[in-house]
Amino acid sequence: MKISIIGTGAVGGFYGSILAASGNEVHFLVRSDYEHCRQYGLKLTSPMGDLQVYPHDVEKEDAKYKAYFWNDPQDLPVDSDFIIIAIKATENEKLPFLLQSFKNKNATILLIQNGLGQENHIHVQLPMANRVFGGLAFLCSVKEAPGHIHHIDYGDLTIAESIPGGSPAEIDMEIEKLGKAFRNARISVTIESDLLLARWQKLIWNIPFNGLSVILNASTEEIITHPNSLNLVRDIMKEVQKVAASENKSISDAFIEERIQRTFKMKPYTPSMKLDYDNKRPMELEAIYLDPLLRAEIKGIKIPKIQTLYQQLSYLEYRNLSQN
Amino acid sequence: MKISIIGTGAVGGFYGSILAASGNEVHFLVRSDYEHCRQYGLKLTSPMGDLQVYPHDVEKEDAKYKAYFWNDPQDLPVDSDFIIIAIKATENEKLPFLLQSFKNKNATILLIQNGLGQENHIHVQLPMANRVFGGLAFLCSVKEAPGHIHHIDYGDLTIAESIPGGSPAEIDMEIEKLGKAFRNARISVTIESDLLLARWQKLIWNIPFNGLSVILNASTEEIITHPNSLNLVRDIMKEVQKVAASENKSISDAFIEERIQRTFKMKPYTPSMKLDYDNKRPMELEAIYLDPLLRAEIKGIKIPKIQTLYQQLSYLEYRNLSQN
C-alpha cells in the first residue's frame, strides 16, 4: 500500500516507520528534520525491536525500505491509499496548507489525534474526501533527536469512521483494509463503529490523567496511590460520562471502574500532555478540555472539576510558554 | 498587662515581641528554641523596625523588657490578663497539654488561627474560660532561625468574640482592652461582633489563594494575572459565599470584587500555606478546606472546585511529607 504520513513526530514517526518496515510504501512529510531524514531516514528505538528506516534510494544489506521523505506537502503522492495525519491537535490550523495536494481528490484519511470531533476539520477542508477515519492511539513515545523516535511503550490503535454529526458508521472492507495494514505491522487494532463514543471513552481516561499529571507533577501511578487524588480522578470521569451521555454516548460505571483498575495494573505512564509541558510545548488544552467544556455548556451541563483543571492548566501553559 | 503566648512561631513570636516592646509583661511558651530564647530572647526583623526582646533578667542600656521564656506550659502565669494561642491549627490536638494550667481558671483567650470554629476547641477544653476571642491575622512573617522572627509585611488583626454556636457577640470593654493592647503596639486592629462571619470573609480569600499558590507554584500576583486562573479564583470565592450563606453569614458580590481588586494592589504575597509547603511542614488543610467541605456536606451544598483543590492538596501534602 501507498501511505502518506503528515506529521512525522512521536506518533506519525512511530506508526510510519513500522508501516514501512512491514513492506508498505510510506511517504513522510518532514518539517524541521528534513535534511537529516533525507539522508538517514528515521531511527526507531522500541521494545518491539529497533529499526533504521533508510530512504528508498539507500540500499542496505539487510533491508530495502520504500520510504520517501518530503518537505513540501505538494510532493506527497495524490494516489496514496491512505493519508495518515498525525500532527498535534494544536496545529490543526495548518491543515489547509498541509492538505493542499488532496484538495479536490478522493483521498482517504486517518486522523490520529486526541480530542473530540477533530475530524470535522477534515470534513471542512476536504469535502471531496472519500472516507475519513479517526484513530485513537494508546501510545507512549517521544521524539528524542532529529529523525529519532523513541517508542517507550504500548502502541494500540482504535479506529472508526467519522460521520459528520457523530452517528455510528458501518464497518466495511475499507476500514478492515486499514486495520490490516497496522496489524501486519504488529500493532493491536480495535475497529469500532462509533467514533464519537470511542473518543469519549478515551477522554474518560485522558481528561483526568493528562491534566493531573501536569498539575500535580506526578505519574499515573502516583496519582492513583492517594485516596483523595484517586477520588478526584473518579469524580472527573463521572463528569465526562455526564457530558458524553448528553450526546447520546453512553459510558457505564463499570467502564469507568475498569479503566481505573487497568491504570493500577499499568506500568507508570507519562501522558503526552506531561511530555509536552516538560518540553515547553503547547499542550492540547483545546482538544482535551475546551472542546468538552463547550459541548457541556451547549447542553447546560455543569462539569466544574474539569473546568477547574482547564483553568489551572491554561495558567500553567501561559507561564510555561512565556518562560521560553 | 500580663500576657501569655502559647506558640512562639512566626505569628505568636511577632505579636508577642511587639506587645513586650510596648511595655506589657509577656510570657512566651517556647518549644524547640527554649535554650536559645532563655539566653537571648527573641529577635524580630521587621519593616516596623528591628527589635531584640531580651529576657527580663538581661539588663540593656536601651530597654528593659518584661519578657519571660518558659518551656513548660505549667509555668505560664495563671493570672495572665490574656492568653494568646498562636499555634497552627494542625497542632490543636496539643491544646489539652498546653492549656493545663488554665483548666479550671477564668482565663481569657485569644486564638489567632486560620479556619472556622477552631475556638470550639477552647470552649471544649476550657469550659470555665472567662471569654474566648478569635483573632484573624493578615500577616506575612516567617521564623527564620532559632529565636529569630522575620516580619515581611502586613500585620493587621481582626478580633471578635467566639460564642458557641456562631451567633454574633456584643462588643464590650474587655475586647476593647484587648484591641488597645495591640494598637499600643502599632498594630491596626478591627473589632467585629460576628466572628464566624469574619472567618468566612477571611476564607473567601484564603481558600483560593492559599491552595492555588501551592498547586500552581505561583504568587498571588501571578495567579490573578491570567484570566482563566483569575476566573477560577472568582468561582471558588462564589462557592465559599454559598456555604457561608447556608450558615446565615451573608457575603456580598461587592465584597468578593473588592477582595480581588485589593489583591491586584497588594505587593506579591506568599500565603502561609505556600510557606508551609515549601518548608515541608503540614499544611492547614483541615482548617481551611476540610472543615468548610464538611459544613457544605451537612447543608447539602456542592462546592466542587473547592473539593478539587482539597483533593489535589491532600495528594501534594502526602507526597511532600513522605519525602522528608
Image (cartoon, coloured by chain):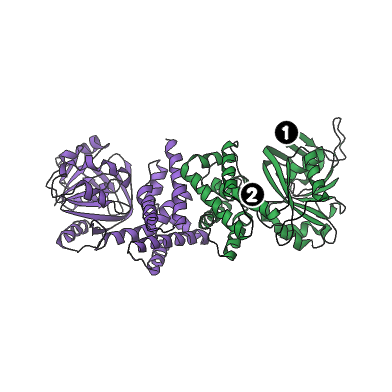
Chain colours: A green, B purple
**Rendered location of residue A73, percent (x, y):** 81, 54
Question: In the displayed structure, does residue B248 sit left or right of residue B238?
Answer: left
Relative to A300, say whether A51 is above or below.
above
- Closer to us: B45 or B11: B11
Q: Position of residue B234 (x, y in %)?
A: 45, 62
Q: Chain of mark 1?
A: A
Q: Nearer the viewer, residue B297 or B35?
A: B297
Q: Chain of mark 2?
A: A
Look at the image and tell me in which quarter the C terminus of chain B lies: top left
Q: Is residue A79 above or below residue A49?
A: below
Q: Residue furthest bottom?
A: B254
According to the image, label 2 marks what residue? A202
Which amino acid is tagged 1? Met
Q: Is residue B220 visible?
A: yes
Amino acid type shown at disc 2: Lys
Q: Which mark is residue A48?
A: 1
